[in-house]
Amino acid sequence: MEFFNTAFVFLAPILIVLSFILKENYKNIVINSLAIVNVLLIINSFNIVKILYGYYQLATIMGIEINLNKFSLGWLEIRIILVVVIPFFFLLKKISAEKLLSIAMVFLLLFDVLTKFINPKVSEVSFSVITFTTDHLHLQLINYISWFVTVYALFGLIGKLPAQNKKIKI
């Protein structure tokens, strides 16, 4: 499931650019696809929460006392909270294909990569939310495509796609 954030970082900018270039017929498909790519970030949110809970379990097993009174909220913590919470807003039809929010998510996910690219001497240890490996890449792609098609079909059936007409004539 770590591939979902990587796929988002690659697909979202491409879909945003295509939404400005393509004609109206294809533009609706691209906008709907952007909405589904955004919604699939929810799976990434659950994965991050699972990882953080694993860290918590490891700390308790090792006997490390967790004191919330000394907890400070820095940029790293705010970034992780935003990466976990913002994808749930994509479930709303009006926000699901919001281009500015998608661009913001790309920057939030790539922040540590961009920081090291701009200033390679940064030695701060951070929690990277982008994990990419080529191990079993074909299986990861098949998994992502199947999730994409399933969520696209589900959102089409319940009428949550942003470019979908509200009135369905039977």
Image (cartoon, rainbow, N blue to C red):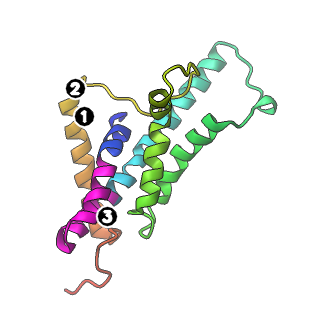
Counting from the top left corner in percent of width and height, residue 102 is at 42, 54
Counting from the top left corner in percent of width and height, residue 36 is at 32, 56
- Look at the numbered disc 1 and give the secondary structure of its residue: helix
In the image, taking residue 41 as reference, residue 29 lies left or right, namely left
Question: What secondary structure prevails in the magenta region?
Answer: helix
Residue 7 among those drawn in magenta:
no
Badge 1: few (under 14), some or many (20 or more) residues near its Cα, within 10 Å? some
Q: Residue at x 34, y 70 (%)?
A: 162
The residue closer to the viewer here, 40 or 77, is 77
* Residue farthest along the right direction in this orientation: 69
Badge 2: few (under 14), some or many (20 or more) residues near its Cα, within 10 Å? few
Q: Amino acid at mark 2?
A: His
Residue position marked by numbered label 2 in the rendering = 136
Q: Is residue 137 visible?
A: yes
Q: Quadrant of the image for the C terminus?
A: bottom left
In the image, taking residue 98 as reference, residue 122 lies left or right, namely right
CA–CA distance between discs 1 and 3?
A: 22 Å
Quarter-of-image position of residue 17: bottom left
In the image, taking residue 49 as reference, residue 93 lies left or right, namely left
Residue 140 is tagged as 1
The residue closer to the viewer here, 148 or 150, is 148
Q: Earlier in the sequence, mark 3 or mark 2?
A: 2
Residue 97 is tagged as none
CA–CA distance between discs 2 and 1?
A: 6 Å
What range of the chain is rendered magenta? 11-34
Counting from the top left corner in percent of width and height, residue 14 is at 27, 51
Residue position marked by numbered label 3 in the rendering = 155
Circles 2 and 1 in contact, beta carbons < 8 Å: yes
Badge 3: few (under 14), some or many (20 or more) residues near its Cα, within 10 Å? some
- Given this view, does label 3 or label 2 mark the residue nearer the observer? 2
CA–CA distance between discs 3 and 2?
A: 29 Å
Circles 1 and 3 in contact, beta carbons < 8 Å: no
